[in-house]
Image (cartoon, helix red, strand yellow):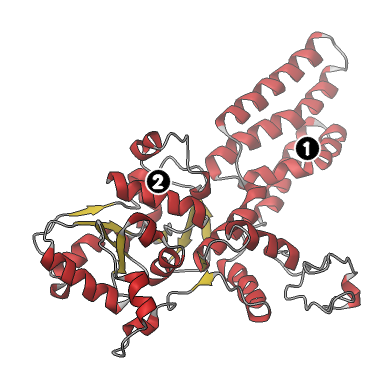
């Protein structure tokens, strides 16, 4: 185990306290999903820009989900085609030059053929079958010594064995890792949706708080689905840099909600933009706001920036979290994922990428992750989102 504080390496049997600096290890590196303190610390430093940015619990969870799903990620279409061409090339050389007998050549060809098939299955099934590539030496020995009539049975047995392995750890296991680390080494830059709870009280907030959040003339009003997104945007000073008043659908912070109502009375044509998760609840956010009389938004135009299924369908490795059970998936068809109760949180990308994307979307009035927005920002894809 490597200490993230003094970089000293020590053996697992020497205990969970560093002998060099008395750092207390929070994560057991032998418990699955395997994650060490130093690995989690590096992820936290990376998404926070070494402490420059505040981030949400989902943003940290999303990075860990990608880490644990990387090993089972499917090959691209190009990779599958190349693997197939290599397989045919090997077969052509073996048969054309008569290097072995026909029976031996057939057994040898079973290996690249099986790998090629597994690549295509991986592309279709989301990477599950790519585990078979790890066992290529076993396949070679198994298929080389077995007659043709028996190695088919060997394939079936091997595939059955590999199918017993789950591609992803349980979502709660990832949360447990974060919570265990946070309990011992508090993650100061991680927001939870209550950083501005004091502004919800009837007591007057400090003048500095009012100045930071409310004492400026906004060009737009941004209503987001969740409170923690408000915290992340405000603490990263997104509202000041973009002149946007930010409030959540739950009217958090309350002073920002009241300011929102005042601005809309004084400036009825003030632009309103919405931002939400790709989920059943998120897709109905606009309707819910219109139906809530306390918002006084009836008849006012609102621009929905998403996330919407048609704007995330081009992502190859988007993270979807189940709303009903303890799992997550990578990729898939957005509409089907939502129908099956999965949610793509808007904050799975690191804050630096997310802030830039939201800023561009709000300025241009283009949906988040849409092809039009990518073209306007002259980028090929938003890798941080998937």
Task: Please tell me in which quadrant of the rendered image residue 8 appears.
Answer: bottom right
Give x and y (percent) for residue 330.
52, 51
Q: Residue furthest left?
A: 299
Regarding residue 36, the answer to whether it shows in the image is no
Q: Residue at x 38, y 71 (%)?
A: 227
Q: Residue at x 48, y 68 (%)?
A: 325
Q: Which residue is labeled 2 in the image?
A: 312
Q: Which residue is labeled 1 in the image?
A: 150
Q: Residue at x 36, y 35 (%)?
A: 376
Q: Nearer the viewer, residue 365 or 96?
A: 365
10 Å crowding of disc 2: few (<14), some (14-19), many (20+): many
Give x and y (percent) for residue 239.
36, 61
Give x and y (percent) for residue 79.
62, 30
Q: Is residue 253 above or below residue 342?
A: below
Q: Earlier along the polypeptide chain: callout 1 or callout 2?
A: 1
Badge nearest the viewer, 1 or 2: 2
Q: Is residue 45 above or below residue 314?
A: below
Give x and y (percent) for residue 252.
32, 75
10 Å crowding of disc 1: few (<14), some (14-19), many (20+): few
Q: CA distance from mark 1 to mark 2?
A: 46 Å
């Amino acid at each position: 185990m490597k200490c993230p504080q003094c970089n000293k390496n020590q053996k697992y049997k020497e205990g969970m306290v560093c002998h060099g600096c008395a750092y207390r290890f929070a994560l057991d590196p032998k418990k699955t999903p395997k994650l060490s303190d130093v690995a989690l610390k590096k992820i936290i430093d990376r998404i926070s820009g070494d402490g420059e940015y505040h981030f949400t619990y989902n943003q940290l969870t999303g990075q860990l989900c990608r880490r644990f799903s990387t090993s089972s990620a499917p090959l691209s279409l190009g990779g599958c085609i190349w693997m197939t061409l290599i397989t045919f090339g090997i077969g052509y050389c073996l048969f054309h030059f008569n290097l072995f007998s026909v029976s031996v050549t057939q057994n040898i060809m079973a290996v690249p053929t099986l790998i090629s098939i597994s690549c295509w299955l991986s592309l279709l099934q989301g990477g599950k079958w790519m585990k078979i590539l790890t066992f290529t030496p076993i396949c070679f020995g198994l298929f080389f010594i077995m007659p043709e009539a028996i190695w088919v049975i060997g394939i079936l047995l091997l595939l059955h064995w590999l199918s017993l392995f789950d591609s992803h750890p349980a979502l709660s296991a990832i949360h447990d890792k974060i919570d265990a680390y946070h309990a011992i080494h508090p993650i100061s830059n991680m927001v939870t949706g209550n950083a501005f709870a004091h502004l919800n009280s009837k007591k007057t907030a400090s003048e500095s708080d009012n100045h930071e959040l409310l004492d400026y003339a906004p060009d737009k009003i941004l209503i987001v689905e969740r409170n923690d997104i408000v915290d992340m945007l405000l603490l990263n000073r997104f509202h000041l840099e973009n002149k946007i008043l930010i409030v959540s659908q739950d009217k958090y912070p309350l002073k920002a909600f009241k300011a929102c109502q005042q601005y809309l009375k004084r400036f009825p044509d003030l632009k309103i933009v919405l931002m939400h998760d790709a989920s059943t609840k998120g897709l109905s956010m606009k309707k819910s706001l219109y139906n809530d009389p306390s918002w006084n938004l009836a008849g006012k135009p609102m621009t929905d920036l998403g996330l919407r299924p048609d704007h995330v369908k081009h992502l190859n490795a988007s993270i979807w979290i189940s709303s009903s059970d303890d799992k997550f998936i990578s990729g898939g068809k957005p509409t089907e994922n939502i129908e099956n109760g999965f949610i793509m949180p808007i904050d799975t990308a690191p804050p630096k990428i997310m802030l830039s994307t939201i800023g561009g979307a709000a300025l241009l009035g283009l949906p988040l992750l849409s092809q039009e927005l990518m073209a306007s920002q002259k980028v090929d894809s938003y890798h941080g989102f998937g």
